[in-house]
């Protein structure tokens, strides 16, 4: 499962290999002998991936706004030069290679944002698990003494 997540992330997001190695460590099953190391690994990794996700969200927003602007410009040109109904003009716009290219870029950026969102959720769940396991092991050690 971890390998599929990392492969998906590699294909969509440009991250340093060290970040991917830390992410792989963070997403693996919990090492009961090294809970503190894992707890220390998660916050900076989470913060970094959150920043990457926010950057991609901003890019996505800009891409969507640029597409809307481009569509508006095309609409004016097509309507004045070619005429036709609103549906005909919209159909002409949507058949343009530039429209298709922009929509594909938006879809790819949306997948990046969603993939990072899933990874961030996994890290949140891992943090909760580590806290619970740490508390369990502390109780076990207190009961042993």
Image (tube, rainbow, N blue to C red):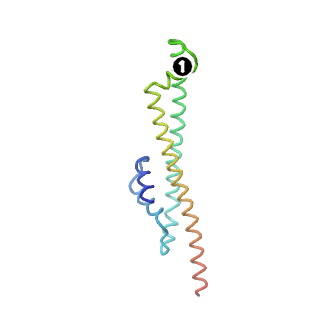
Residue 123 sits above or below residue 117 on the image? below
Residue 79 rendering spot, x and y as whole percentages: 54, 15
Q: Quadrant of residue 143?
A: bottom right
Residue 49 rendering spot, x and y as whole percentages: 50, 52
Residue 79 sits above or below residue 111 on the image? above
Q: Quadrant of residue 6?
A: bottom left
**Quadrant position of the C terminus in the picture:** bottom right
Q: Nearer the viewer, residue 41 or 110?
A: 110
The residue under label 1 is 88
Q: Secondary structure at mark 1?
A: helix
Q: Nearer the viewer, residue 11 or 135?
A: 11
Task: Please give the name of the residue rendered at 46% of the width and 64% of the height, measured from the top-left corner.
Answer: 28
Q: Quadrant of residue 133?
A: bottom right
Task: Please give the name of the residue rendered at 40% of the width and 57% of the height, measured from the top-left corner.
Answer: 18
**Quadrant position of the N terminus in the picture:** bottom left
Residue 97 rendering spot, x and y as whole percentages: 43, 27
Number of marks in picture: 1
Identify the residue at the far left of this view.
17
Residue 69 rendering spot, x and y as whole percentages: 54, 26
Residue 60 sits above or below residue 34 on the image? above
Packing grade of label 1 (10 A; few <14, some 14-19, many >=20) is: some
Task: Please give the name of the residue rendered at 53% of the width and 40% of the height, measured from the top-left corner.
Answer: 58
Q: Nearer the viewer, residue 119 or 51?
A: 119
């Amino acid at each position: 499962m971890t390998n599929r997540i990392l492969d998906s992330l590699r294909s969509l997001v440009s991250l340093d290999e060290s970040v991917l190695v830390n992410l792989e460590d963070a997403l693996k099953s919990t090492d009961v002998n090294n809970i503190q190391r894992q707890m220390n690994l998660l916050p900076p990794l989470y913060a970094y991936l959150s920043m990457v996700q926010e950057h991609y969200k901003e890019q996505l927003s800009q891409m969507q706004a640029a597409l809307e602007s481009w569509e508006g410009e095309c609409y004016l040109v097509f309507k004045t030069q070619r005429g036709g109904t609103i549906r005909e003009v919209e159909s002409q716009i949507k058949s343009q290679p530039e429209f298709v290219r922009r929509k594909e870029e938006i879809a790819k950026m949306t997948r990046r944002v969603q993939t990072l969102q899933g990874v961030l959720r996994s890290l949140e769940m891992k943090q909760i698990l580590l806290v619970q396991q740490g508390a369990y092991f502390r109780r076990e050690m207190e009961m042993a003494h």
